Amino acid sequence: MTPEQECQEGIHKIAEMITGKCGLLFTDKLPADVERFFADYRPSDYARCGSVATETVTLKKGVDALAKLPHSIEDGGGAGEEERRLRVRSS
């Protein structure tokens, strides 16, 4: 980007420093607060084969033990799609 192409004066200086996969974060928070947030952040994810359980779940005996739980956590992509393509049973 050149000074003539920029949408705001001086923005071309930032564009020169950005390469690859990156992003910009604008906030009124203190730098220490932002760094602490990202240091503590752990994204949620579903368990996969080989994952170690982080908590114990106990189900009552009977046919209805799983009735209120979702039948699938698949979102239409990823491993579920690959299993269907390969006709692999997930149970």
Image: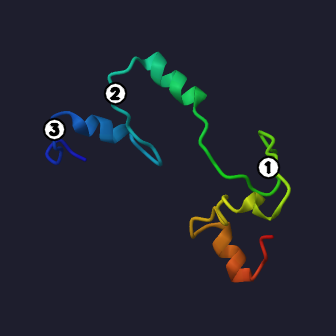
Instruction: Answer left or right for 77 relative to 47.
Output: left
Q: Nearer the viewer, residue 14 or 62?
A: 62
Q: Quadrant of the C terminus?
A: bottom right
Query: Of label 2 and label 3, which has the lower sequence position?
Result: 3
Residue identified by numbered label 2:
27
Decide: is 67 above or below 35. below
Q: Nearer the viewer, residue 11 or 75?
A: 75
Q: Judge depth for marks 2 and 1 and give the one in front.
A: 1
Task: Give the quadrant of residue 75.
Answer: bottom right
Residue 78, percent from left and from top: 63, 66
Disc 1 marks a residue whose amino acid type is Ser
Residue identified by numbered label 3:
8
Residue identified by numbered label 1:
51
Q: Secondary structure at mark 2?
A: loop
Task: Give the quadrant of residue 48.
Answer: bottom right
Residue 82, percent from left and from top: 68, 74
Residue 81, percent from left and from top: 64, 74
Disc 2 marks a residue whose amino acid type is Thr
Query: Of label 2 and label 1, which has the lower sequence position?
Result: 2
Tell me the residue at 31%/41% (across/down): 15
Instruction: Answer left or right for 9 relative to 1.
Output: left
Disc 3 marks a residue whose amino acid type is Gln
